[in-house]
Image: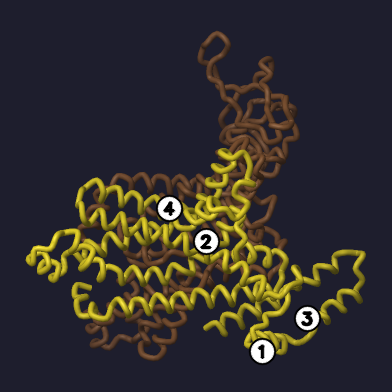
Amino acid sequence: MSEQAANRNARLFRPARGCAAAVLLAFALVVLFAGFLAPYDHTTQSRQAISAPPSTIRFRDGEGHLVRPYIYARRLVDPLTFRYEEIETERYSIGMLVEGEPYDLFGFIRTRTHLIGILSHDPAAPRLHLLGTDSLGRDRFSRLLIAIRFSLLVCPLGAALACLLGILFGLLSGYAGRLVDTVMMGAADSMLALPTLILILAARAAFPLELPPMRAAFLLVVIFALTGWAPMARLTRGIVRSLMESDFVLAARSIGLTEIRIMFRHILPNAAPALLTQALIMLPYFLLAEVALSYLGVGVQEPEPSLGNMLAAAGDVTQLTLRPFLLLSPAIVIFIFVLAIRLFAEESPNVGREQERSG
Amino acid sequence: MLLVVSAIAFVLLSSAGGDSVSALRENPQVSEQTVERLRSVYGLDRPLAVRYGAWLADLLRGDMGESISLRSPVSRLVFSRLINTLKLGVTGLLIAVGSSLILALLAARLRIKWIDRAISLIVLVTASTPRIVLALFALALTVALAGSAIAIRNDSWAALFLAAIVLAFPLIALFLGQADSELKRAMKLPFIQYARAKGLSETAILLRHALRPALNPLLTIFGLSLGALIGGSVIVESILGWPGVGALMVWAVRGRDVPLVMGVVVISSAAVWLANTLAELLQLVNDKRMRDTEIDR
């Protein structure tokens, strides 16, 4: 991209970059505190509220005074279109930091405190569904948070591993030069040109369809790393080649440093900023690959929610006609995440344009 | 390269945990003898290297074996689906390339600020809308408009265009961004000044002189994006019900149908490789005299 165009983009997107950073921070918080932010456990089913719309939260009582927010209990009136009717005599208040179902904060601190919930210990009390429930009566908001946590843990892990592989590959190729370089870059180019998603699917087909979530996640990380290293290798190699000709490398060599030291202490740190941007830009592709696999039913499987298998529910056309936006809420989350990453990484648009992969 | 990919895929598919027949073991009504007989019928009991050798020899004769779950020859299955995917892919590419070129040419010709901004915005939005998101919204929209999904579950023109637009969407970001900056760069080359001095109209300069050097980098990313296009077709075809290779691949993976998976991998890789070579050839044709003028690279 020309310098002028780059400036133009910088001007257009400067405030947006701050917003993007804030959004990414929010995603990070969700990853850390998903269990706390979610009002309920993501597997608990509520038989009284199947495919229910979001709870209507009310702030004023019958006389119009501001009161503590509350919801009414609901009753299913039409099982065909899943229409619910509020029972105005049964009022339940909403509170902050309420006791609820137990969960593990950060994976090891057992606690029962949730950020919001219904202030009632009556087991028959209605549940607070910010985004309604799915066809098994599970709280969609809670599932969405847990899904974000899962997807945003697996994908950066896969991306990190792929980057590591790619950087090592590129360093070696750029540093060795000649025949090694030709062969290694030939491999990287072929890898880039191959249909990645088809390869990922083929690799996935080698393993049993039903896998426990942790093993499936591990498998996905490994597959992503093995199929996604090529862009990084290409970029690293290019940067290494150009840095090799710089004066500081000549200086380092002339004072007799070892090649390994030059490579890791002098060349790599100088390449780091561009590589980091590239790593950031690659992140959405891994997220989308996970979403695609889980959507197709070969990634993470129920009951463990992931953005992909939550979207699979949108394939149910009758549900889709009833509440399109609720069913597509994971899609909206994906869009926001990818947009935020793009805006945040906008500083060096050249890097991103070169790769357009699965998804 | 194809050989390496196919060998790796074959070993992976055949070695790790079970094949399409072993799933039958979980069915109490199927006896162990039946499973063993089926395995020998499909040659699954022979050693791995032998099986790969046999598969390769068959491939050279144009025979890719029989799909285990669909019971018909893999080559026929894949090729009939490939035509559908090609139809979709070519339409998508035409949409992406056409709209990006037109927009970029307009921007380069008119040089109005808000058009430039609009292009930046379009690039950003199209780049961050994944196909899976767009396809699901397209499905929701069709369902809302037509009342059912049947409207798009056939091979009408509307279905083709809908799927092609979804497929083309992320490519627009790629092509538009590149075409825009390349055209602007080309317009600053010395021979453009010369053409201007000759008194040619801006439109003629743009179309006859600037477009050509700008086309080459476009052809490069065109070649690179083909793999992504086939990958993207997996999603688009599965969601919008287009009977192409992508949907077939999903079926094969779910059924752990090794011959079919292998067939799709080999044929789609070969197709991408072929198209890539074609893009490189086109580049050579276009590049013949331009090589020297690529100065400010």
Same-chain check, marks 3 and 4: yes
Tag 3 subunit: B
Tag 1 subunit: B
Chain-order first, disc 1 or disc 2: 1
Tag 4 subunit: B
- Label 3 belongs to which residue? B44
Chain-order first, disc 1 or disc 3: 3
**What is the secondary structure assignment of the residue under circle 4?**
loop
Give the quarter of the image for residue B49.
Answer: bottom right
Front of the two marks 3 and 2: 2
Answer whether labels 3 and 4 touch (C-beta < 8 Å): no
Residue neighbourhood size for the residue with mark 2, other residues' Cα within 10 Å, grouped as few (<14), some (14–19), many (≥20): many
Front of the two marks 1 and 2: 2
Q: Which mark is residue B57?
A: 1
Q: Residue at x 44, y 79 (%)?
A: A169
Answer whether labels 3 and 2 touch (C-beta < 8 Å): no
Tag 2 subunit: B
The chain shown in yellow is which?
A: B
Front of the two marks 2 and 4: 2
Chain-order first, disc 3 or disc 4: 3
- Label 2 belongs to which residue? B88
Q: What type is the residue that disc 3 sits on?
A: Leu
What coloring was used for the rendering? by chain
Q: What type is the residue that disc 1 sits on?
A: Ala
Same-chain check, marks 2 and 4: yes
**What is the secondary structure assignment of the residue under circle 1?**
helix
The picture's colour for chain A is: brown
Same-chain check, marks 1 and 4: yes
